[in-house]
Each structure stands twice: as structure tokens, then as C-alpha cells.
Amino acid sequence: YQTITASGSLSGDTVDLASIRPLTRLPLLEGSAGFSAELGGPAPFVRSANVTIQHGRVKWNGPVPTIEDIDVALVVGADGARFERAEASLGSGRVTVDGGLLFDGWDDFDNARVDATVTADDALILRRTGLKLRSDAEVTVRGKLSERVDVAGTARLSSGKFVRRVSVLPDYRSQGSNINLGIALPTIPDPIGSRVRYDLAVETQDPFEVVTWVVDAPIQVDVKLRGTGAAPRLEGTLAASDGVVRLPAMNLALTQGVVTFTDARPGFPNLFAVARGTRFGVDVQAQVQGPIDELEIDLTSTPALPREDLTVLLSTGRLPDDLRERGLRSQATLVGTYLAQELLDLYFGSDATDRDETLVDRFRIESGREISRNGVETLTIEFDMREGFFLQAERDMYEDYNMGMLYRFKF
């Protein structure tokens, strides 16, 4: 047995990261990397090393956006590896990392401890079709890699939007989804996943926008990410105090909505929501409550009507007796109006979160505010011209057709 020692220095030419991208299977890898080391003593010979990455860009498969402007200076020694500098851009927002990996000599690497702080400033943390999230954050990552690593801190959503075109009309092409599976969060595979422990608060600075064309509402988020990397869970609430629920026959104003996540059934939050609307002098209240896989819907009204009558009113815009008396003519008007709005949304709308406002967003079609003596519903079509001006065409309660320009004051 003989101890081998070495001394000297080692440095390499700058490496173009794009040249090694095929080895990584990443969709995108760019930038330049440099390496230098000081050698001395017995194996593994390295006293210290420096790794730099400049002008880096990387894209992983999945919803995480491209990380750009990567600028890293990593110093490695016998006592650990620490970042002298670690910065990057996520969608024009900045992310910095301080700290590093600590260990007592190369032989003690099995007991390495991570101690790092990640700071984000309006970083685009998630982006895919119909979903965009920006966040400020300060998160600490601390612990022994072989035992337990705690991820804690606060993420404040600076802006967020969820856009998905949903229709109350059935889509016979859809295979559906199994709601009994609950809500699943991304996981980290074992053995690493079971060592990671979360205690991360997620809040909103400004409401998170939900736009589905059936339910539109601003959402306040106040949840915590708990559990392990292998089995993460949410605790807390998502809440809305206003919004709109669009049905074929009428719109309901959302007055209260709360989604509560508990540790009892992490994937099945409880929903409580109240929405109200008026149709032909009937004030309707819809209340939804229960876990998402066992929702209960309660319909009440003033004047009081049977639940079955209210279901017909919400679905058709008419009460059962009125349907039998007036026949199908008014229902054809209702269905035609709703289908017209659906077609406009389908051909001219968009699910993009950063889209500009389209012509569809500026149209409003409403029927059934009043009824003529012959049982024909009124019909109003408005186009928003901006600055409070609207073009309006209508069929009124006398079955006359009118067209004009409106100006609305806002107080």
C-alpha cells in the first residue's frame, strides 16, 4: 500500500454547452462553461476548483419555462461547494441562489449538508397552455442530504391566470376524467423524495384570475405546501368573493366561494360556493358544498319554488308551466342565443393567458329580460366600443327591432 500525492493546477478550455446538449436530451441548452482546479495532496488530489457558466439557457421538458441569462460561479473545496454568484432569469423575472453544500473533507461527503437560499423577484415559475404563474419568493433549503432536507419559506404570487374554454354543452369527443383520483401534485421519486420535507406558504399579492367562460372569478390563495417530496399535500384555502357563473338561461353572480384543503383527505378539497341570479322576477340562489367527489347542490328561491322547477328555470329560462303553455318557440330563441355565443367563443376566442382582448370579449348577448304578449323573449346584442360607448341592437318587448348607441356612466 502506497500513498500517491500530486500537485499542480488544471484548467480547461471554455466549453460550448450546446455541443453537449445531445447527451442531456434537453430541448435547449446553450451557454459557455469553464473549469479550473488546484491539485495537491493525496487522492482525490483536488484542493479547490472553480466552475463558471455564462450566458446560459436551459429548457426542461414540462411546464417550467426556459431559464435564461444563467450566470454561475461555483467554488469547490475540501469544506464544501458554495456559490459565489448564481443568477438567472425566468420570464424577465430574476432568481438568485446563495449558499451551497457543506462537508468536512472529501471523505465526509456522505454527511454533506445543504444550506441555500433561493430568492425570486417576479419570476415566471410556471407556464403552459392556459396557465401562467409569476411569483416573488424567499425559500431556504437546509438539511443533511442522506437524512432530511427542509424546504421552507414563502412564495407570493405576483400575478397568475388560468384560462380554459369550458362549455356547459356536452363534448361527446371527450373521454372524461376520473374525479375519484383527486388532485395530484408533482412528486419527487424515492429515496430522495421521502427525505424532502415541505413547509412552504403560498399567498397572492393580487388575485389569481380564473377564466373558463362558465365560471370567471378572481381567486385569493392562502395555502401551505406540506408533506414530503414523495407525498406532498396542500393545506389552506382558495377564496373568491365575486365572479360570474354563466348558464344557458341566465347568469348567476358568485357571492362566495371557498375551496379548503385539509390533511384528512389531501387530494379531495371541500368546496363551498353561493351564487345568485334573477329570471322573470324569480330570485334564485344556488349553494354548492362538499368534497369535490361528493358535491351537493341546493337550489332555493324567492318566491319559494320546488327544486325541480328551479332546475328547469336554470336550464331553460322558463318554469315548467310556462314551457307547457308557450311551447318550443321561446326555447329555440334561448338555445340559438347560447349557441351563437358558443360559436363566437369557439372561432374567435383564445385560451392563451397573455392574449390581447378579442372581438368576442367585447360582445354581449342577452335574452329573456322581458317577454312580449305573444311569449317572445327580448333579445339584446351589445358591442363594447370602449370609453363607455356601446353599439346595441335589440328586439324589445313589443317585438320591434331597434339599433342605437349607448353611453354608460360609471361611478
Image: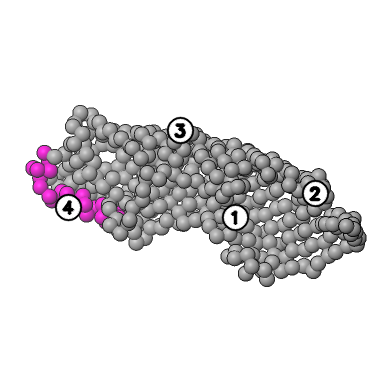
Which is more foreground, mark 2 or mark 4? Answer: 2
Q: Amino acid at mark 2?
A: Asp
To which residue does mark 3 refer?
Answer: 264
Left or right, 135 with respect to 349, comes to right
Query: Residue at the location (64% across, 46% down)?
Result: 120
Callout 4 secondary element: helix
To which residue does mark 1 refer?
Answer: 91
Range covered by the magenta-colored residues: 321-342
Query: Residue at the location (68% across, 61% down)?
Result: 56
Which is more foreground, mark 1 or mark 4? Answer: 1
Q: Residues under labels 2 and 1: Cα distance?
A: 41 Å
Q: Nearest the camera: 8 or 11?
A: 8
Who comes first in sequence, dot 2 or dot 4? 2
Contact (Cβ within 8 Å) of mark 3 with mark 1: no
Contact (Cβ within 8 Å) of mark 2 with mark 3: no
Q: Residues under labels 2 and 4: Cα distance?
A: 80 Å
Q: Nearest the camera: 244 or 174?
A: 174
Q: Amino acid at mark 3?
A: Ala
Residue 394 pos. (x, y %): 23, 51
Left or right, 405 with respect to 222, comes to left
Callout 1 secondary element: loop
Left or right, 36 with respect to 111, comes to right
Which residue reaches farthest bottom? 19
Asked where in the image residue 114 lies, by quadrant, the reply is top right
Q: Amino acid at mark 1?
A: Gly
To which residue does mark 4 refer?
Answer: 332
- Is 125 covered by the magenta stretch? no
Residue 228 pos. (x, y %): 57, 41
To which residue does mark 2 refer?
Answer: 107
Residue 350 in view (yes/no): yes
Q: Give the overall secondary structure of the magenta segment.
A: helix
Who comes first in sequence, dot 2 or dot 3? 2
